[in-house]
């Protein structure tokens, strides 16, 4: 009941100094009121009855009642701040993911695409106040899911992304343009594209520079990520008779100059992910760079706790009055 009690008027506790003063006053006054009688013998007298010994209890009850009243004047109360509302100004984010065959290269474990999906999934879970959409691109591009605040839909769509949904190739310009198209009508305070690729623009009918200019026109910031180790990687180079990929060592080629240019023009930043750990670090950094603005309103509810103390003081005074006018009446 009195857990986490605070006092609205703690200055009234200074009145508690009256209690020891009253106790001293009572001690000296009682000694003065006690009469003395000298006799030769006390035989036949009853000395020190229980009632006379308990008479100071009346004053103790009065002091306890006074202490309860002073504590009540200090206004004990509990504070409840469990009820609160949040107004969030979120960010709209589109993740443009390269799904070309080279994303099956095994320089990241188990391969680039799987590693990306794991890291991107964690990133999505850390953005509860934002709307997120997914765009996939290879030789062409498509919207996997439009921007939405329903993270379960986005995460489900992310898990479904796989190679083979599109004609093979790397159409960076089209992937970026489709992402811009998803964000151009957004009213969010910040619009962001995270574009990831592991290759060089070699497909599509939209130039990356043109798509970057569109992003600038609509106020969309673009973070670009080049994915792949430095040197050679075990990459799909053909098909076996059973239809599965045949792997071979291929040099990793990423158009870093293009990705840097896109990031610079749109006000973003370029990153290079050479392994799983570096990819995680990049998404963590983007997560820190793009902070969601949160305005929080707290509603405080105070519950007064002085009433039980007033009731206690009343009971003590009533008890003192009853005892004074019954059991102890003959001793007063």
Image (spheres, rainbow, N blue to C red):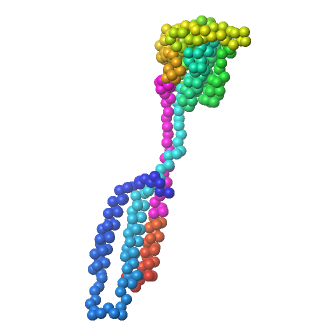
Considering every residue shown, the one lying at the far right of the view is 242
Q: Which residues are magenta?
A: 283-309
Picture layout, residue 217 above or below residue 28: above
Which of 197 and 180 lies nearest the eye of the viewer? 197
> Residue at horizontal 69%, vertical 9%?
240
Q: Per the image, is 226 magenta? A: no
Give coordinates of residue 113: x percent, y percent. 60, 18
Give coordinates of residue 209: x percent, y percent. 54, 8
> Residue at horizontal 54%, vertical 19%?
194
> Residue at horizontal 45%, vertical 77%?
322
Count of labels shown? 0
Query: Which quadrant is the C terminus positioned in?
Result: bottom left
Give coordinates of residue 24: x percent, y percent. 29, 71
Note whether residue 172 is visible. Answer: no
Give coordinates of residue 330: x percent, y percent. 40, 85
Q: Quadrant of residue 169 in the image?
A: top right
Which of 289 and 302 lies nearest the eye of the viewer? 289
Which of 158 and 217 lies nearest the eye of the viewer? 158
Note whether residue 31 is visible. Answer: yes
Which of 136 and 279 lies nearest the eye of the viewer? 279
Picture layout, residue 258 above or below residue 294: above
> Residue at horizontal 44%, vertical 70%?
316
Picture layout, residue 191 above or below residue 301: above
């Amino acid at each position: 009941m009195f857990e986490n009690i605070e006092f609205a008027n703690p200055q009234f506790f200074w009145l508690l100094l009256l209690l020891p003063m009253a106790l001293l006053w009572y001690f000296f006054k009682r000694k003065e009121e006690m009469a003395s009688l000298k006799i030769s013998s006390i035989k036949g007298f009853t000395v020190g009855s229980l009632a006379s010994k308990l008479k100071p209890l009346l004053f103790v009850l009065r002091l306890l009642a006074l202490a309860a009243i002073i504590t009540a004047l200090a206004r004990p109360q509990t504070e409840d701040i469990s009820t609160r509302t949040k107004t969030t100004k979120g960010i709209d984010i589109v993740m443009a993911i390269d799904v070309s065959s080279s994303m099956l290269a095994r320089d990241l474990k188990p391969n680039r695409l799987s590693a990306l999906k794991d890291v991107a999934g964690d990133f999505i879970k850390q953005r509860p106040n934002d709307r997120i959409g997914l765009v996939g691109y290879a030789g062409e591009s498509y919207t996997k899911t439009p921007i939405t605040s329903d993270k379960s839909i986005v995460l489900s769509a992310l898990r479904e992304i796989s190679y083979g949904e599109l004609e093979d190739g790397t159409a960076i310009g089209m992937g970026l343009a489709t992402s811009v198209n998803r964000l151009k009508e957004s009213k969010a305070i910040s619009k962001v594209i995270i574009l990831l690729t592991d290759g060089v623009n070699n497909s599509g009918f939209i130039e990356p520079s043109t798509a970057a200019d569109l992003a600038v026109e609509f106020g969309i910031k673009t973070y670009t990520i080049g994915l792949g180790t430095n040197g050679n990687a075990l990459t799909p180079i053909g098909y076996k008779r059973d239809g599965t990929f045949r792997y071979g060592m291929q040099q990793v080629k990423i158009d870093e100059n293009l990705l840097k240019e896109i990031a610079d023009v749109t006000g973003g930043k370029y990153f290079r992910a050479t392994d799983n750990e570096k990819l995680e670090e990049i998404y963590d950094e983007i997560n820190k760079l793009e902070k969601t603005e949160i305005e929080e309103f707290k509603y405080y509810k105070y519950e007064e706790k002085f009433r039980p103390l007033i009731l206690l003081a009343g009971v003590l005074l009533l008890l003192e009055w009853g005892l004074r006018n019954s059991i102890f009446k003959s001793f007063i």
